[in-house]
Amino acid sequence: MVASAHSRLANLQRHFQTSDNVGKDGLNGGNVKISPEVAEALSRGDAVVALESTIISHGMPYPQNLETAKEVEAIVRNNGAVPATIAILDGIPCIGLTTKELERLANLGTKAQKTARRDIAYLVASRGNGATTVSATMFFASMVGIPVFVTGGIGGVHRHGEQTMDISSDLTELGKTPVAVISAGIKSILDIPRTLEYLETQGVTVAAYKTDQFPAFFTETSGCKVANSVLCRPNLFLSCYICNAVLYHEYLTSNCIVIYVFYFYYLGRCEHPQEELTKTDNNTDIALVKNNALVGAKIAVAHARMRQ
């Protein structure tokens, strides 16, 4: 346990130290800011949960986005873990945001660039503001040793992806970055069977929470089954896995019916049809991410206990 704590401290110190050596993603150690709360929790081996920031900037309007971000962080704290919301502010990757930084990001809204792994170097070099997506959040979480990450839903293979090659970078990140992702599954309008096949190709363990059915973001099942157990994975030193949690409420199913009708009406050309149909109704998204935060915090706490 002591050796593990020293290892984590050394890892954190590397990211605080300045260096003339720039990494392959355009970052050096002095350009990463870790909040004192997150740094202390990591040094002690306490449970920490990474949170993406795209939901704050692009998921809903101000001040609903700020209120939701604070509520999600509170859920993580109330269940024994430390939240680490991740974003890039003025070109500095921030792992764990202060209240003022959360407010700033919420006010920026869509003026903050939606940032995947490929965009990190540009945002840092241009000193821009970026809200991290799944791939970028996983990258930074892994960099400092945060093993659990909570999001709403992940990207996947788009319909007709075999022709367009429109495949989310989330999937390749899942295959190479050792972070457990807790989500409500793959976004419903995507090609879920092909996405699961792609995850298999990437060597990603896929598990569902309290069910063997793979959820479809707004519904309890997508018609696809998944494996039940991930108990052996930490001891095998494998890459990463994705665990899916889904909220069981009737309005999820009814919303999904409306979304699918809207999707097929536009022949799949709208990337987020539910936003076009109900721009001011984000209750479903909020409920899902809150439930995922609850499950993710419990998993992070259990994982921290296993490592001690």
Image: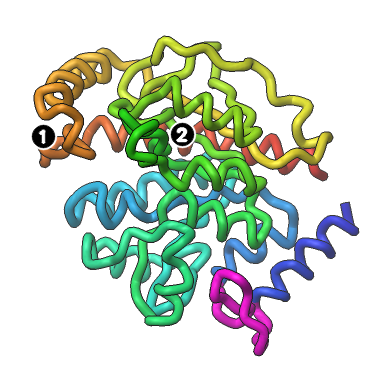
**Residue 300 rendering spot, x and y as whole percentages:** 63, 40
Viewport quadrant of the C terminus: top right
Residue situated in front as seen by the camera: 198 or 74: 198
At label 1, the amino acid type is Thr
Taking the view exactly as shown, the residue that stands out farthest to the bottom is 20
Residue labelled with disc 2: 183
Quadrant in the picture for residue 188: top left
The answer to whether residue 143 is above or below residue 176 is below
Q: Secondary structure at mark 2?
A: strand
Q: Residue at x 41, y 10 (%)?
A: 223
Span shown in magenta: 16-33
The answer to whether residue 62 is above or below residue 128 is above
**Residue 15 rendering spot, x and y as whole percentages:** 66, 74
Q: Is residue 23 located in the magenta-colored stretch of the structure?
A: yes
* Mark number displayed over residue 278: 1
CA separation in Å, label 1 and label 2: 22 Å
